[in-house]
């Protein structure tokens, strides 16, 4: 492979041949977002958090390479104002919350990991358990077709983030989902044929 093919776009940091800059939508949100990312997910070529941060540059992404990374990331996140998006036993569905309670929420924490790892992290980290957990009772079906999900209700982190923002703040995040579809479709088509999964 020639060096040219490894050159990355300054805008989106993907390889130039996979640049998705043309589809980045202009969206904003009043919400603060923290994504706690498993190091394995961070390396995954199809991870949606890279796409999420292109749309919403204020999203804070922390790769959990050490225990200190988690405590640093949570240090200034007030549990009165931040919620953890995680379907624990005590999690409250965002769809069922009164608007007065939704308006108290300023920030949302997501765990970007496999379900098994996310569960392990949640149950082993008291730091995470101090945040009230919220979940979805009727999230839309995932459009995330590239990677296999354990169930149809399992949303990619970008989709979960888009949906949670819509539920909490009422801001329309449809452009975010549309961007994910366009970007993934484009990048998938650009994959060398030997990188594609066999049918
Ligand atoms: Zn680009």
Image (cartoon, helix red, strand yellow):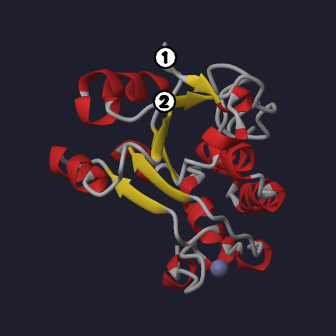
Q: Residues within 10 Å of mark 2 (few under 14, many from 20)?
A: many
Q: Are marks 1 and 2 in contact (CB under 8 Å)?
A: yes
Residue 37, how many percent across, how many down?
40, 47
**Residue for point 76% across, 35% down:** 142
Q: Nearer the viewer, residue 24 or 3?
A: 24
Q: Nearer the viewer, residue 25 or 17?
A: 25
Tell me which corner region of the image, top left, top right, bottom left or bottom right, holds residue 22. bottom right
Q: Nearer the viewer, residue 124 or 148?
A: 124
Mark 1 vs mark 2: which is more N-terminal?
1
Residue 64, how many percent across, how many down?
29, 47
Using residue 127 as the reference point, say whether residue 2 is left or right of it.
right
On the rendered image, what quadrant is the C terminus found in? top right
Give the secondary structure at mark 2: strand
The numbered mark at residue 194 is none
For residue 176, say whether it is visible.
yes
Q: Residues within 10 Å of mark 1 (few under 14, many from 20)?
A: few
For residue 160, say whether it is visible.
no
The numbered mark at residue 133 is 2
* Rendered position, 134 above or below 106: above
| Residue designated by label 1 | 90
**Residue for point 72% across, 22% down:** 137
Q: Nearer the viewer, residue 197 or 169?
A: 169
Using residue 36 as the reference point, say whether residue 171 is left or right of it.
right
Residue 188, how many percent across, how many down?
73, 54
* Rendered position, 2 above or below 54: below
**Residue for point 34% across, 47% down:** 39
């Amino acid at each position: 492979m020639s060096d040219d093919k490894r050159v990355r776009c300054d805008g989106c940091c993907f390889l130039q041949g996979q640049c998705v800059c043309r589809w980045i939508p202009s969206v904003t949100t009043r919400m603060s977002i923290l994504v706690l990312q498993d190091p394995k997910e961070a390396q995954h070529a199809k991870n949606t958090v890279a796409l999420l941060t292109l749309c919403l540059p204020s999203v804070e992404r922390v790769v959990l390479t050490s225990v200190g990374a988690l405590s640093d990331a949570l240090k200034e996140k007030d549990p009165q104002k931040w919620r953890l998006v995680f379907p624990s036993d005590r999690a409250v569905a965002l769809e069922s919350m009164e608007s007065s309670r939704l308006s108290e929420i300023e920030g949302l924490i997501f765990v970007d990991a496999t379900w098994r790892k996310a569960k392990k992290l949640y149950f082993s980290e008291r730091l995470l358990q101090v945040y009230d957990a919220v979940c979805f009772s009727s999230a839309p079906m995932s459009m995330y077709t590239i990677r296999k999900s354990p169930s149809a209700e399992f949303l990619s982190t970008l989709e979960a983030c888009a949906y949670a923002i819509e539920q909490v703040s009422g801001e329309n995040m449809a452009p975010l989902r549309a961007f994910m579809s366009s970007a993934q479709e484009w990048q998938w088509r650009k994959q060398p044929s030997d990188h594609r999964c066999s049918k």
